[in-house]
Amino acid sequence: MPQGKVTTVPQDGLTTRQRRRQAVLAVHTGAGKGKSTAAFGMALRAWSAGWPIGVFQFVKSEKWKVGEETALKTLGRSGGAPVTWHKMGEGWSWIQRPGTERDHAAEAAEGWAQIKRDLAAETYKFLVLDEFTYPMKWGWVSVDDVVATLAGRPGTQHVVITGRDAAPGLLEAADLVTEMTKVKHPMDAGRKGQQGIEW
């Protein structure tokens, strides 16, 4: 694909400007690092364009702080476009201690229900559904419902979904799919994650 050039022009009766302003559904998937980071980079561009941002993080603990959260929340309080951040779902359960179990499936389902309400109300212009492929993979949220809801969303609401193992139906529905592939990682040499690099 030549830089900045489309490979085909559809016969859809739309002008170039109208096509350029259509809502985008993006999916960042694959085993490599950088899926969420790329989505938050898109959110920075959206914030710069003056769009209200909604971030919904699945499979992340409420206690887990990421640098992008601090940066985007600070920007949201700076007088520009608002940024709202939600955490729900699994909550790093593989390291939780006995007696701390929660109904993660119910939390993920409620998170999706809130996203549906926000889409219907056009609360945000740009939504990041971080690690959202996992609730679909685990059967907590219906892939068919996600695809149908996103296909029918009103207005021009852009959505980016991140996570490994994206469902084929979601990939088919997306306008933009990027697969992150690991070539090399510091963990291969026994180096654990670092602040400023991993979070």
Image (tube, helix red, strand yellow):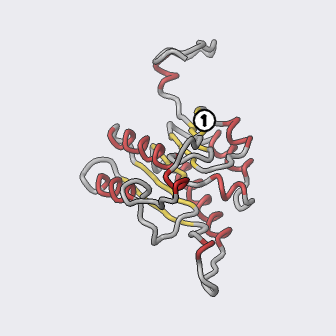
Q: Is residue 152 above or below residue 65?
A: above
Residue 153: give x, y in percent of width and height: 59, 42
Q: Secondary structure at mark 1?
A: strand
Q: What residue is drawn where x is 58% and y is 43%?
A: 182
Q: Residues within 10 Å of mark 1 (few under 14, many from 20)?
A: some
Say which quarter of the image contains residue 90: bottom right
Q: Quadrant of the C terminus?
A: bottom left
Residue 78: give x, y in percent of width and height: 24, 53
Q: What residue is drawn where x is 52% and y is 22%?
A: 19
Q: Outermost residue, bottom direction? A: 99
Q: Is residue 75 above or below residue 125?
A: below
Q: Is residue 138 above or below residue 96?
A: above
Q: Along the line of sight, which residue is nearer the eye, 127 or 61?
A: 61
Q: Quadrant of the N terminus?
A: top right
Residue 77: give x, y in percent of width and height: 28, 57
Q: What residue is drawn where x is 48% and y is 59%?
A: 191
Q: Outermost residue, left direction? A: 79
Q: Along the line of sight, which residue is nearer the eye, 28 or 84?
A: 28
Three-letter amino acid code at the position of disc 1: Val
Labels in figure, total:
1
Say which quarter of the image contains residue 29: top right
Q: Along the line of sight, which residue is nearer the eye, 69 or 111?
A: 69
Q: What residue is drawn where x is 71% and y is 62%?
A: 140
Say which quarter of the image contains residue 71: bottom left
Q: Outermost residue, front direction? A: 189
The residue at which mark 1 appears reads as 177
Residue 39: give x, y in percent of width and height: 48, 45
